[in-house]
Image (cartoon, rainbow, N blue to C red):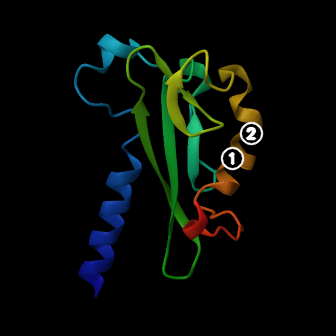
Amino acid sequence: MREALVLAALVSVAAARMAYVFSSGFEDVIGTPSETFSCEGRPYGYYADVDNDCRVFHVCLPIVGEEGEASTVAHFSFFCPNQTMFSQESLTCSNSQEAFPCQDAASIYELVNAEFGRIPDQNIDLRNE
């Protein structure tokens, strides 16, 4: 049991260190990123990185311990393909003309992430469509 706990702790520490770890060639698409975004204190969700003009986005995943307490937060970073940016409204990489304004992304972090994964409460009859 002790070995399993140690292994779980090591995995969570390793996972939490995935911030700003990108695939090769990222410099050609986004240049050298500013590493200012932090997942500390944030709930699970997707977050546009305003300091990187929303060309980078992050997934924050609180890791819960055996007692139900958040022990650490895993932080994963991704970059959008060339000529796109992360739209906080749709949680997708989009053409800049169609994306939610990057400078306003932080204002809707909570609103959009609260709806992530929620199935709309609608009574849809697919047989008549």
Mark 2 residue crowding within 10 angstroms, few (<14) / some (14–19) / many (20+)? some
In the rendered image of this protein, does residue 27 appear above or below residue 86?
A: above
Name the residue located 22 percent from the left edge and 25 percent from the top edge. 24
Q: Quadrant of the N terminus?
A: bottom left
Q: Is residue 22 left or right of residue 38?
A: left
- Percent x, y of residue 86: 54, 29
The answer to whether one can see residue 37 in this image is yes
* Circle 2 SS class: helix
Numbered circles on residues, count: 2
**What amino acid type should be assigned to the residue bearing mark 1?**
Val
Q: Which mark is residue 17?
A: none
- Percent x, y of residue 40: 59, 48
- Percent x, y of residue 74: 45, 53
CA–CA distance in space, label 1 to label 2: 6 Å
* Circle 1 SS class: helix
Q: Nearer the viewer, residue 2 or 38?
A: 38
Task: Kindly give the residue lying farthest to the bottom in the view shown.
Answer: 1
Task: Kindly give the residue lying farthest to the front in the view shown.
Answer: 128
The answer to whether one can see residue 39 in this image is no
- Percent x, y of residue 83: 44, 13
**What amino acid type should be assigned to the residue bearing mark 2?**
Ile
Residue wearing tag 2: 108
Q: Is residue 87 left or right of residue 105?
A: left
Name the residue located 37 percent from the left edge and 61 percent from the top edge. 12
Mark 1 residue crowding within 10 angstroms, few (<14) / some (14–19) / many (20+)? some
Q: Quadrant of the C terminus?
A: bottom right
Name the residue located 55 percent from the left edge and 82 percent from the top edge. 67
In the rendered image of this protein, does residue 60 appear above or below residue 4?
A: above
Name the residue located 35 percent from the left edge and 14 percent from the top edge. 29
Tags 1 and 2 touching, CB below 8 Å: yes
Residue wearing tag 1: 112
